[in-house]
Amino acid sequence: MRSFLLFILISASKAIFACGYYPHGEDTRISLFNPHAFGFHLYSEFYYSTNSFEPNPDRFPLNYVDPNTKLWLDYCRGKVDVHSVYDAVYKLTEAEIVEASQNAMIQYLYQKKDNDALNYLRFAKNCEYFNSWQDDPWERETFSAGPKRTELMTRAIQLSEKVKNQELKKRYAFLAIRLAWYNHNYDQVKSLFAVSFENIKDKDILYYWSLYFKSFTEEDHALANFELAQVFAHAPDKRFACHQQYTKAISIDQTLQFAKTDEERANVYLLAAIEKYDKALPYIQKVYELNPTAEGLSFLLLREINKVEDFVLTPSYTLFQPSLSYDSWSAGKDSSALQTLHRAEHDRIYAKEVLRFI
């Protein structure tokens, strides 16, 4: 009994801080507009949320046709169904690209006696293993991928120069750029891009995939941000990686100096807006001014509405601060319900600005 009383006295004389459940983040955020319901699947990794951006392998909607598959569909003049093209490009092995194949795209290429395309597909399949940093996943050091990559890169350059079809030329050049990147030959990446893609007017996914690897070699972070913004706008499969490589410390004005067209400037503002968790309306307005038909514009608007919901509705209905506000944990910050509601009134003014723009 004496020990118990002593415990009570000691406890009563000390300030005790305990950690327990406290609603925060997505537990308190109020949102009425679900971006998934509006079909923004390709931007699902960047929905407004208290959770960090993260890769989403399910971001591609049902029946989505990626830009590379579309290129091959055009190459086959629309004579082959989408699924056959996808399977031929992404699923078949090198050994399965034979005349007896049941794949409609392979059959079509054999019927057209398009040996250049068939040889390209075989070569691309042969390169797939080497699209990785890891020489030997088991770290046995019995095999080095470097020399083999160099051999394949050299061969890809030769084939790019030899083949007559312009699209296949670009495809071989892209393979060479990717192999050079994984082989740490960064100067080679830049020189190959300069020769094969620098002055291209009709920019397709092969251009943006190649620019993606080139952006990683840039020592000038403003230039890298510019290139990443262009890739982000045109290559949905590279968007999360572009976000990861984007340098927020670089001002948007530094990045804009590399833009030559309004579309390129709009793309810079698009990625900059994606990276902003706070009010991004000025950037959205610039995207609209420079490129009113920008694909990501509607998503940015809905994302800004989600922010307004959090800024205004969350405090109004829960008396908590907006879910992305951490002021309550900062010394000297007034996080009282009254102050929270006062902030919400200021955010209502911003909500009206967003509404006027929409």
Image (cartoon, rainbow, N blue to C red):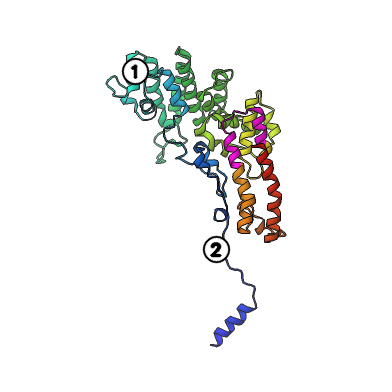
Amino acid of disc 1:
Tyr
Residue 46: give x, y in percent of width and height: 55, 41
Residue drawn at (67%, 45%) of the image: 351
Q: Is residue 119 magenta?
A: no
For label 1, the SS is: helix
Mark 1 or mark 2: whose residue is earlier in sequence = 2
Q: Can you see residue 310?
A: yes
Seen in the picture, residue 118 relative to 358 is either above or below; the reply is: above
Residue 127: give x, y in percent of width and height: 41, 27
Residue drawn at (59%, 84%) of the image: 6
Quarter-wise, where is residue 190 in the image? top right
Q: Is residue 287 magenta?
A: yes
Q: The C terminus appears in which quarter of the rendering?
A: top right
Residue 302: give x, y in percent of width and height: 58, 40
Residue 300: give x, y in percent of width and height: 60, 38
Magenta residues, as a range? 283-303
Q: Which residue is mark 1?
A: 108
For label 2, the SS is: loop
Q: Residues within 10 Å of mark 2 (few under 14, many from 20)?
A: few
Asked whether 63 or 136 is in front, the reply is 63
